[in-house]
Amino acid sequence: MRTCPESSVSSPARQCRSVLAHTTNATLDRLQRAYHQQERFIADASHELRSPLASLRTGLEVALTHDDTVDWPFAARRALHDVQRLQLLTADLLHLAANPEQAMQARDTVDLADVAREQAAERTLDPDSPRVRAEVDGPAPVTGATSQLERLLRNLVDNAVRHARSNVTITVRTSGRPGVVVLKVLDDGPGIPVSERERVFGRFIRLDDARARDAGGAGLGLTLARDIAVRHGGTLHIADSATGALLVAHLPSAHRPPPLG
């Protein structure tokens, strides 16, 4: 990408031109990085969309070729599964592409303690799911978009359930740091190596170890979870734990303490 020459002469006019050239070059660098990032994202997204589409097409072609012997209910269930994968992946891509200001127009007061209890209760309906329990110490109000905050916790729990051996714990606390709600999701699976803890938040990232036995995940769950946390003025990281993986989100409380003085 073309850049502007920066003058080293110290006259006022040339200093102004040098500042302008420096600012222009910095802007061009940012645009170039954004362009390459978009190129990589489009390539990755195309690859991820190709997989469920190919599976859907192959399943339907095989079924139509052997229409006299095919198990049509099974073929329909398989096709539905692929369509659901496409739907979820498309929704994830649209969320990541959304303008943060537009996505945050709806602002509600959401009790994360209630969300944690509800999502733990939902998991009891699946007999094959690891045990999921919620531990809360009272109301934990956060200001933001209800659907996004629910998605944040759901993505963390989905990730934990996929890799847990038998137990997942959701913890919501308001004590500790004033004005901050702390959300933790812990599983008893193989854990995430320290060297990989930041990389797993990248788009379309799957680890190659035991945590990669994923039932159809696109590698966007943790990316979306962090994106939602950041859009709500918070953070999301992976902390040390005695067993499994511990994901910790800090979000501003809707009931912030008054300023001192």
Image (cartoon, rainbow, N blue to C red):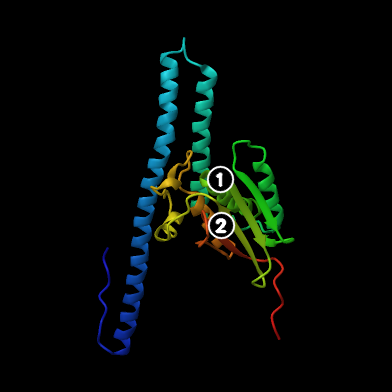
Callout 1: helix, strand or loop? helix
Q: Is residue 28 above or below residue 10?
A: above
Q: Is residue 42 above or below residue 248?
A: above
| Total numbered circles | 2
Q: State which mark lies toward you, 2 or 1.
A: 1
- Outermost residue toward the bottom in this view: 11
Q: Nearer the viewer, residue 185 or 105?
A: 185
What's the residue at 35%, 51% (across, down)? Answer: 39
- Outermost residue toward the right in this view: 138
Q: Percent x, y for residue 123?
A: 64, 42
What's the residue at 52%, 44% (across, down)? Answer: 162
Q: Percent x, y for residue 50?
A: 39, 36
Give the class, few, some or many, for how many residues have Cα within 10 Å of label 1's Cα (few <14, many ≥20). many
Residue 161's disc is: 1
- Outermost residue toward the front in this view: 242
Callout 2: helix, strand or loop? helix
Quadrant of the image containing the N terminus = bottom left
Closer to the chain start, of discs 2 and 1, is: 1
